[in-house]
Every structure is written in structure tokens, then in C-alpha cells.
Amino acid sequence: MNDVIKAIKDRRSIRQYEEDVVSANDIEFLIDCAIHAPSGFNAQPWSFLVINDKEALHDLSKRCKKALIPLIESIKEKPDKAIDFLAFLRSPNTSIFYNAPVLIIVLADKNVMTADYDCAMAAQNMMLAAHSKGLGSCWIGAAQPALMDEEYLRELGAPVGYKVVAPIIFGYPDGEAEMPERKEADIHWVR
């Protein structure tokens, strides 16, 4: 199996990290891999906000938890996973970033029609590149509600005219993640 296929099939979402810092060179490598993603009309509509300060990550986690708890509480019939996640969010000792040392937020130019898709492909490039270097990653969708606040996003350092597509944590895995069960592909042929 070639390296690309192996990376695609072996990469996992990592939710336990060692305390080791991810170097600036490794962060720049990940972003360089991201910008080699395809984009509609070659617009390359991405920008990257890197947060690797522990205190800033802690504050952002608290803000994200505060924004997310009411959304999950409003679900009338919560599945077990939602109930477990709500307990996780309510705990003062948990971080939605799983104590990863760096968060890279992939931002999309709001004026580019294909920006969401383009930035999602850039995000996948970063996660596969991280795996190739022995780094773990996890797309943190739970950060999205708090990061929809444009004023707060600007305070963090995001450029005007951009929105969040992919908040992704990176770091050195503390242990191995299990292979989640995969469903069979649902394929519909048109012949």
C-alpha cells in the first residue's frame, strides 16, 4: 500500500495528547501542505489562525463550552453520546481541545463561492500531513458556535471578511486511537 493510501486509512482523530510543543517549523509544514489543496477557480480562499498559547486555548475552550452547553441542552431527546458530551462540557477540568498544544483554525474568504469546500480540502491535507509526521489531529466542530462570533474572531486575530471552517488541534498522541467501525459504502450507479 502506498504512503498516501496508508495515511488515509490509518489516520485517526486523536483526543489525548502529550505535553510536547509542536515546533513552528512543523506548524508551517502543515500549513504549506494545506495550501497545496485544490480550490475552485484556483481562488485559494484560505487563511490560518494559529493558537499555541496554553492560556489562550484554555480561555477559548471555556468560551466554546459556554456557547455549546445551551445548544445541547435544547435537544429534546438526547442520544446517549449527547448526554455524555454534555457531562464532559460541564466539567471544569475538561478542555474541548483535549489539552493539545496547538489549534490551527482554517478560515475561509466569505466572498469566494467555493471557499467552504476548498478550506475543508486544505484541512484534510493538514491532517494527513500531520499523520505522516507522527502528529495527531482532530477537527473540533464543538468550537464552531463560539467562533461564529465575528467580533471575538477578530479579537483572536482573524482577518476581516473571513469565517471559520475548520478548527483543528494538533499534537503528539498520548497512546493510540482505536479504529472506529466503518459502514459499507452506499453506492448508487448510473449506467
Image: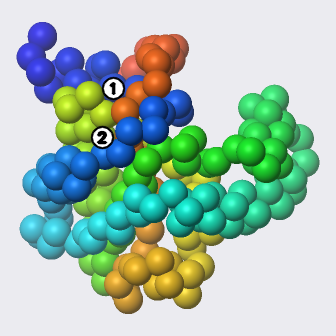
- Mark 2 residue type: Met
State the residue at coordinates (16%, 69%). Answer: 44
Mark 2: which secondary structure? Answer: helix
Where 150 sits versus 168, above or below? below
Kindly identify the residue that appears in the image at 47 percent across and 33 percent down. Answer: 17
Q: Find the residue positioned furthest to the right.
A: 76
| Residue located beneath label 2 in the image | 127
- Name the quadrant containing residue 38: bottom left
Q: Nearer the viewer, residue 137 or 118?
A: 137
Q: Is residue 157 left or right of residue 178?
A: left
Image disc number at residue 171: none
Residue 24 seen in render: yes
Of residues 18 and 86, which is closer to you in this image? 18
Q: Residues within 10 Å of mark 2 (few under 14, many from 20)?
A: many
Q: Position of residue 55 (x, y in %)?
A: 56, 63
Q: Is residue 112 left or right of residue 103?
A: left
Which label is found at residue 11? 1
Q: CA gap, disc 2 to disc 1?
A: 8 Å
Q: Is residue 1 left or right of residue 156?
A: left
Q: Indicate the quadrant containing the N terminus: top left, top right, bottom left or bottom right.
A: top left
The amino acid sitting under disc 1 is Arg
Q: Is residue 26 above or below residue 35?
A: above
- Is 128 drawn above or below residue 65 in the view shown? above
Secondary structure under tag 1 reads loop
Residue 115 appears in the figure: no
Q: Residue visible at 23% across and 72% down?
A: 45
Q: Position of residue 125 (x, y in %)?
A: 22, 44
The image quadrant where one finds the C terminus is: top left
Q: If you read the primary sequence from the N terminus, does the residue marked by circle 2 or circle 1 appear first?
A: 1
